[in-house]
Amino acid sequence: MEVKCPICTKPVVWSPQSEYRPFCSKKCQLIDLGEWAGEDRKIAGKPAQDATPQAMDIEEIEAMLAQQPNDFFKH
C-alpha cells in the first residue's frame, strides 16, 4: 500500500521497511514534529473550561471541610 507523505506528498510505501512512515524521510518527520511543538498543528477538541475557581465553589468546599471530623492532629 502507498500513502502520501503528510508534509511533501511524495508517495511512501507503507511497510516495515519504510523507516519514517508515514513520512518519506527524517527531514519531513522533523518538520512535522516542529509543527506540533510550535502548536501549528493541533487536534480539534472542546475549549478548556476556565480553571479559576468561582466564589461559590470555594464556599462549597469550605462547607464540606467544616462537616468533616478533624482527626488530623489526634494521631
Image (cartoon, rainbow, N blue to C red):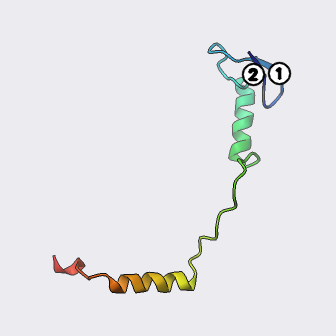
* Picture coordinates of residue 12, whole percent (x, y): 76, 18
Q: Is residue 59 left or right of 73 when viewed as pictured?
A: right
Identify residue for label 2.
Answer: 24
Q: 74 or 34: which is nearer to us?
A: 74
Point out the residue furthest to the right here. Answer: 9
Q: Residue at x 35, y 86 (%)?
A: 66
Q: 51 or 29: which is nearer to us?
A: 51
Point out the residue furthest to the left here. Answer: 75
The disc at residue 10 is 1
* Picture coordinates of residue 51, whole percent (x, y): 59, 70
Q: Can you say whether 40 is above or below 61 in the image?
A: above
Query: In the rendered view of the protein, which quadrant contains the C terminus?
Result: bottom left
Could you say which quadrant of the image residue 18 lies in? top right
Amino acid at dot 1: Lys
Could you say which quadrant of the image residue 31 lies in? top right
Q: Residue at x 70, y 30 (%)?
A: 29
Q: Can you say whether 20 is above or below 68 in the image?
A: above
Q: Is residue 22 left or right of 51 when viewed as pictured?
A: right
**Circle 2 Cα neighbour tier, 10 Å, few/some/many (<14 / 14–19 / ≥20):** many
Say which element carries label 2: loop
Could you say which quadrant of the image residue 1 lies in? top right
Amino acid at dot 2: Cys
Of labels 1 and 2, earlier in sequence is: 1
Q: 33 or 71: which is nearer to us?
A: 71
CB within 8 Å, label 1 to label 2:
yes
The disc at residue 49 is none
Say which element carries label 1: loop
Q: Residue at x 78, y 31 (%)?
A: 6
Alpha-carbon distance for marks 1 and 2? 7 Å
Point out the residue furthest to the top here. Answer: 17
Q: Residue at x 78, y 26 (%)?
A: 5
Q: Is residue 25 left or right of 49 when viewed as pictured?
A: right
